Image (tube, rainbow, N blue to C red):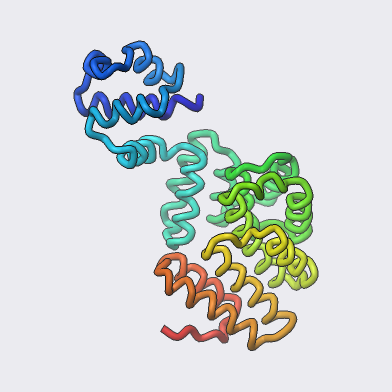
Amino acid sequence: MVYKKYGETFHKIRKQFGISLSELSSIGIQKSTLSNFERGKSMMTFDKVVLALQYMGVSLEDFENFLNRYYALDPLFLLDQVQEVVISNQSEKLNKLLDIAEQEGHHYIALAIKQLLNKVSKKEVEEIVDYLYQIEVWSYKELCIFYLVIETLNSSDIIYLLRNFFKNNHGLFNSKKYQAYVGQLCCNAIVLLSDRCFKEEAKELLDNVKDNDLANTLFVKTLLIGAEGYWNFLFKDKEYGKNEMIKAISILKMVDLKEVTLYYEKKYKHLLDKIVYDG
């Protein structure tokens, strides 16, 4: 139930601060309203939540931190954790996240983590592909899973899924958040397909990213520079492509995304071991 995690977290905070329902009711919030909210039976209006938190001396930021701490098992939060671990190269933490995903019944997230750990079987890869093929309405969760497993997929599956995505999911492009994440996914796919010598398909994807304005943040624009640079390096102009990839890393360094920079620097060096990055 969507209200449950908010109410339970609110309840934990209230108990921790030793504040009774009766005490909170003194500021104009009925005990029944508070009780139903804490038990997940109903949502409490935003202004009442803020009022109660202020009375307890808790900011909205603190409340969000409590949510994250108590509800790391939420599938979206779990996916964010997985991506942070991948970017920061802390692969030793993936086994713990795999245990959590399996215990909480997040089956496809568990399969995605197993793929990152190179523990996924051929049958499980086929299960992931079947799952992705059946998606009609993409959300952040499905996009994250696709992003995490993309390197395991056959090129034909990647091409089909992304072509179908652009054909049927333009509604997502109304959201800047989704635009940015789809752009990030596509930049990864461009590099991957280019590396597998799918020149035309990678170029088609490049054009789709540009035509749909998916590189709408500095981060995704920078990834697009790197991805297009790699395409150029392989198929058009090696020197220009190499310089564009170096440029992408330089931009990431300038905006001080240390872990992200190291991740992509390592990735690009793996692709092009002749590139030397100047400090």
Q: Is residue 118 left or right of residue 36?
A: right
Q: Is residue 161 left or right of residue 119?
A: right
Query: In the rendering, at what x and y percent does residue 145 appear?
Result: 60, 48
Q: Is residue 274 left or right of residue 171?
A: left
**Residue toward you, 116 or 198:** 198
**Residue toward you, 58 or 202:** 58
The image quadrant of residue 68 is top left
Q: Is 166 rendered above or below residue 234?
A: above
View extreme (top): residue? 32
- Residue at position x 71%, y 66% in the image: 206
The image quadrant of residue 88 is bottom left
Query: In the rendering, at what x and y percent does residue 207 appear?
Result: 74, 66
View extreme (bottom): residue? 239
**Residue toward you, 17 or 69:** 17
- The quadrant in which the C terminus is found is bottom left
Q: Is residue 162 left or right of residue 77?
A: right
